[in-house]
Amino acid sequence: MSAPLLVYVTCADPAQAAAIARAVVGEGLAACANILPGMTAVYRWQGAVEESAETLLLLKTLEHRLPALQARVRALHSYQCPCVVAVPIAAGTPDYLAWLAESVIAPAAPSP
């Protein structure tokens, strides 16, 4: 079985996070998403320290789907350099991890 991952994505606002979440869950790239509005980001961008409101999007997926998930998030995201990072899920309840694995759709096999 492919390893479960938690994918951390920062978004411009709740609407963008919701649109990305609906797309990647609907396409089977992630099992579920959590949207946490009200975050403040302080970061260096193009030589200056910036501060802005952001929304955190947490996605749960499997390692073998990460490249496709990252590509899809980048395609839907408004940022030039979006934060899309994954961390391993070291442990979890067996029933939750089984549900996660069942909910992420395997990529379609190429046609012969």
Image (cartoon, grey):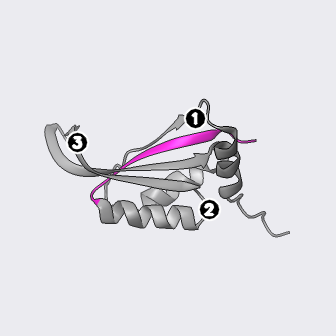
Q: For this rendering, which residue is in front, 6 or 49? A: 6
Which numbered tag is attached to residue 28? 2
Provide residue 59's location: percent of width, then percent of height.
49, 50
Per the picture, the main secondary structure of the magenta-coloured stretch is strand
- Residue 42, quarter of the rendered image: top left
Q: Which residues are magenta?
A: 1-13
* Residue in the image at 46% along x and 57% along y: 73
Q: Residues within 10 Å of mark 1 (few under 14, many from 20)?
A: some
- Residue 68, quarter of the rendered image: bottom right
The C terminus lies in quadrant: bottom right
Secondary structure at badge 3 equals: strand
Q: Which residue is mark 3?
A: 41
Secondary structure at badge 2 equals: loop
Q: Which residue is mark 1?
A: 89
Q: Is residue 16 above or below residue 38?
A: below
The answer to whether the residues at label 1 and label 3 have Cβ atoms under 8 Å apart is no
Which numbered tag is attached to residue 35? none
